[in-house]
Amino acid sequence: MASFSTSVTQRGAARTALAFIAPGFLLFAVLIIYPMVRAFQMSFYDWNVIAGAASDFTGFHNYVRAYHDPVFWRAAANSAVYMAFTVPPQVVLGLLVAMLLNNRAPGRALFRVLFYLPVVTSWVVVSLLFQYLFADSGLVNWMLHDVTHLTAKPTPWLAGRWTGMAVVSALGVWKGIGWSMMIFLAALQGVPKELMESAAMDGAGPWQRFRAVTLPAVRPAAVFVTVMLVIGGFNVFTSVLLVTGGGPADSTQVLLTYMYQQAFKNLDFGYGSAIAVLLTLLVFALSLVQLRLFRSDPEEAP
Amino acid sequence: MRRHRKEALALGAVAGLCSALLAGCSSHDSSSGSKAAADSPVTLTFWGTYGNGGNKVQTDALSQTIIPAFEKAHPNIKISYVDVPYDSLLQKLTTSAAGGKLPDLVRADLGWVPKMGALGVFAPLDQKMSDYQTLSAADYPGSVATNKFSGHYYGLPLDANTRVEIANSDALKKAGITAPPASFAELKAAAPKLKDAKVSVFADSGLQGWNVYPWIWSAGGSVTNDDQTKATGYLNSPQSVAGVQMLADLYKAGSIPNLIVGDKGATQTSDGLPKGVYGTILDGPWMTGIWSGQYPKFKPVYAPVPAGPGGSISVVGGEDIAMTSASKHQAAAETFIRFTQTADFQLAMAKTGQMSVVSALADQEAAASPELDPFIKQLATARSRPSVPQAPQIDTDLSNELTAAFQGKQTVQQALDKAAGEIDPLLTATH
Amino acid sequence: MTSAAHPLSRRNRPGNGPRSRSRNQPRLTALAAARYATLIVGAAVMVLPFVYMLSTSFKSQTYVLSIPPQFVPHPATTANYSGAWGSHDFGRYFVNSLVVAVCTTTLSLLLSSMMAYGFARFRFPGRELLYRLLLLGLMIPAMMLIIPQFILAKYLGLLDSLAGLVVFYVAGSLPLNTFLLRGFFAAIPVELEQAMRVDGAGAWTRYRLLVLPLAKPALATATIFTFLASWDEFAWSLTIITTPSKQTLPLAIELFQGQNSTLWGLVFAASVIAVLPVIAVFLVFQRYFVQGLTSGAVKG
C-alpha cells in the first residue's frame, strides 16, 4: 500500500481516524459481528430452533461429524474445483476486455453495458436460463450436435458430476467477467498515460508496455479482484442450487448448498453452523495467503 | 464550490426522501398495530402457497369467496392471508420460529408437520381441540396419518392430492397399445413395443419416496412397520425389492429416461408426456390446468396406478393446516381450522384443483369436477409416507442409494438393504 | 503510486511532444478491426442468453420450450408483460425495491468511504485488527447469519419494515465497499493532501474536497455494485418481511414459480422489467470512468 503522512501527531491521528471509522464500524459490529459470534456459538450445540428453548451442548461433535462426512469432503472438493475453474478466466478475461474498452472509441459505452449485462441479471434467472440452455434438448446441445456435429450425441450435461460442475463454472465465468472488467476499467484510469507514450516512443512493444506500465498500475485491482473472486467462488450457492440441485445424488454439492440443506431442510443448525465456520476459516486462510503472496513481490515499485 | 453545493443538496434530498419514506412505511406498521389492539376483532395471519406460479384462481377463491364467507359468519375474526413461495416457506417458518415471530396458521406441506410438531412450533391439535376426533374421522386416513408424531396430531388435513397414471393415448397407439397399462405385466409387455416407436413407456423425475413408494406398495411391499419404528425387513423385503426392480430393469433396457436418476437437463414429465416422448407418467390433479394452458391440444388419459400383487396403491400428498403454539389467538385459529373442514371451504377449493380431504364429500366433488374422479378413487386406498421429523433425510438417503443402483453401481437389493439400515435410526429420531 | 520514480519516466525529455497515434494509419486500422472483432464476439457471447430470455418473454407458454430454439418469437405476445406487471402488486414491489436500494446505496457509500479514508490515511493502534475484522465479514456465508440477525432485528424493532432491510444491507455492504475504496484512496498522492493541510484544511475538508472527487471511478463502481446487491437480495427480504405490501421485487419474481410448473414467459418478463433500473444506474455511473480519463488529477 502507499505511504501516508506521519507528520500528524499520533494522538490527533487516532482520534480523527476513529471519528471517521466509528459510525460505519459500529453498525458493522452490531449487525454483522455479533451475529457472527452467535452463529459460531451455534456450532457447538445440537441447536434447538425454537426461540428461547434450551439446546444440548455437544462441544466439537458437529466438527467431528463433518470430518467423517464423505458428502462434506466432496462438497469442499467441488467448491475448490469451482474456484479453480472460474477465478483465472475471470481475472484474465476481465482485464483483457477492460483494456479493449479503455479508450474513446465510439460504441464504447454500448459494449460496456453489454458486457455488464450478465452481472446485472439476477442469479436466479440466470441459473434457470443456463439449466434451460444446457438441457439434453437445449440450445447448447443443439449447437454442438445438430448444427456443428462436434459431438456424436447430445451430452447429458446435468447428469454427471464433472459435466454438471462444468456448466456451473461456465455460468460463473460468464456472469463474472463484466464485474472484474468494471474494476479493471476503474484501475486503468490510474495508468500514467505519459509513461505509456514514452515507452511507445522508446520502441517498447505492446507486451513490454503491458508488463512494465499497465501491470504494475492495475496490480492492486488485480489483487482485489482475485481475493474477492476466491471468496465468491467458495460462496457459490444459487447457481448450484438451481442448475443441478446439488445432484444427482449429492455429487455436485458445494459447501454452501450442503450447509443450506443441513440447516434449512433438515433443520440441523448446529451442523450447518459448523460447516459455515469451517468454510469461513478456509476462505480466511486462503485470503491471508493471497495477500501475503502479493505483498511480498519484489517487483512492486515503492 | 457550486458543484459541492449541488452535491450537498442532492445528498440532503436523498437523505430526506429516505427518512420520509422509511418512516412512512414503519408508521403504517405501528398504526395498524395499535388499531388491532383498540378494536375487538382478532386478526389471524395465515401463511400459504396458494398464489404460487401466478395462480390467481386459488387466491381469488380464497379472497373473494371463502374468507368473506368466514368473516361474515364470524364478525370478530379477520383473516390476513400471506402468500409465500413454496420453496422458501420452510425456511421462512424456521427463521420465524427462531425469532419467535410466527403466524397463527400455516398451510404446511405434509412432510413438515411431524418435524414442526416435534420442535414445538406447531400445536398438538388433538389436545387443543375437543372435537379433533370427530373432525379427523371424516378425513381420509392416509391424510390424517401425515399429522401424527409420537402419539399426537399436529395438524388437520387441508387438501389432498395423489398420483395416478396419466397416459398419452396417441403415443401409446404408435405401438398398437389401446389402453394405459393397468398392471405390472402390461407395463413390462408394452415397454419393448414402445421403445421401437421411440417412446419411453414410463418417466418420473426422481427416486424419492413420492416416486417409488407407489411401486413398492402396489408390489405388495411396505416401507416401515405399522409403528414407523423399523425399515429393515420392510423396505428391503422381497416384494419391495420386486417393485423397484421392475423400474430398474426398465431403466436398464432404455425404456425409462435418465430423468429418473436426477438429470435435471432431461425433458420434464410435464413436457415429455404431451409431446409424445413419454407414454405414461404418474402425476397429480394440477396437471390438467397446466396442460390446458401450455398444450391446449393435448388430451391426457387418466388411469389407476398399474396394479401389482398388492393392488393399485398410490401415495398421499397435499397440505395440512396447523396452528402455531406461539399463536396468541388460539381459540379464533381453531374456529378457522374447523371452518376449513366444512363443505363450503372444501368444495370451493376443490373447484380450483385442491382436492377435498373429507371422504364424505367425494361424490359431490366428483359431480362438480369430473376430471378429479380418478384421483378421488385413488385417494381411497392411498397411503402416507413415513411421518417423522427426519423425513427429508429419509428421502435423501433412499434417493441416493437407489440412484446408485440404477446407475449400475449396486443391485437394487443392496441399495434397499443399505437404505433401510440408514433409515432405521432416522425413524426413531426425536427431532 | 507510480510517478517520477518510475524507471521508464522521461519527464524531462526534450524534443517532440507525444506522438499522436492517428498518424499511423495502416497499423491502426488493422488493430482497431481486430479489437472490434474480439469485442463483438465477446459481447455476443455475453448477451446471447439474455437475448434468448428477452425473446422468450414475448412468447406464449406453448412455444417456450420448442426445439430447435426460436430466437424470434413467432407469434409474439405482450401478455407476459401485462401479466407480470398486473399481478400481485408488482408495481408496489418495484417501488419498495427502489426505495430500499437508493437508501442503502447512499448510506453505504457515505459510511464506507469514511471508513476507507480512516484506514487509508491514518496510522493508529489496532488499525489492522479492525480492518481484518471488517474483511472477516466478507467471508462468512450470509445464510448462516440469518437467524441471529432475525432475533437481533426483532429486538431492535426492525421486523417487517423497509428500514430493517436498509440497515442490514448497509452493514453487509460495508466490508466490500471499504475494501474497494481503501485501495483507491491510498493511491492518491499524499503530497496533495499535505498541501491542503498546510493551507489549514481539516481532515473532513480534505476528505470531502480532495479525496472523494478524485476517487470518482471507485465511488461509481461501489455505487453500481451496492445498488445491484440491494436490488437483487432475496433471503433477508423473505425472512423479515411478512406484510405483502412491503415485499420486494425478487420475492415477486420467485412467486411466479409454481409448486408444480413454471410459467417461463412470465418469469422472464418480470425479470426483464426488474433488470431495467440496474441497467439505468450502470449507464448513469459508468460515465465517471470517462471523467477519470480527462480529470488528469492523478498525473500530478
Image (cartoon, coloured by chain):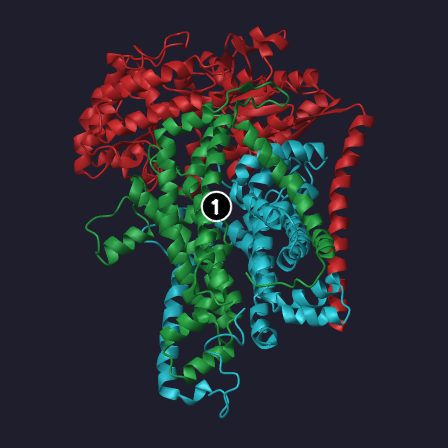
Tell which chain the image draws in green.
Answer: A
Residue type marked 1: Val
Question: In the rendered view of the protein, which quadrant contains the N terminus of chain C?
Answer: bottom right
Q: Report whether residue B196 is seen.
A: yes
In this orientation, which residue lies closer to the viewer: B316 or B342?
B316
Tell which chain the image draws in red.
Answer: B
User: Where is residue C212 shown, x and y percent of the image?
Assistant: 66, 64
User: Where is residue B149 shown, x and y percent of the image?
Assistant: 50, 12
Q: Residue furthest right?
A: B38
Query: Chain C is shown in which shade?
Result: cyan
User: Which residue is at a point 49% across and 44% down the rendered structure image?
Assistant: A284
Quarter assignment of residue C218? bottom right
Q: Which residue is mark 1?
A: A124
User: Where is residue A43 shown, x and y percent of the image?
Assistant: 52, 28
* Disc 1 chain ID: A
Quarter assignment of residue B91? top right
Q: Report whether residue A235 is seen.
A: no
User: Which residue is at a point 32% across and 28% down the rendered structure image?
Assistant: B400
Q: Secondary structure at mark 1?
A: helix
> Label 1: few (<14), some or many (≥20) within 10 Å?
some
Question: In the rendered view of the protein, which quadrant contains the C terminus of chain C?
Answer: bottom right
Position of A74 with respect to B356 (left or right) is left
In this orientation, which residue lies closer to the viewer: C8 or C243?
C8
User: Which residue is at a point 55% across and 26% down the rendered structure image?
Assistant: B349
> As displayed, is residue B93 above or below residue A152?
above
> As displayed, is residue B8 above or below residue A84?
below
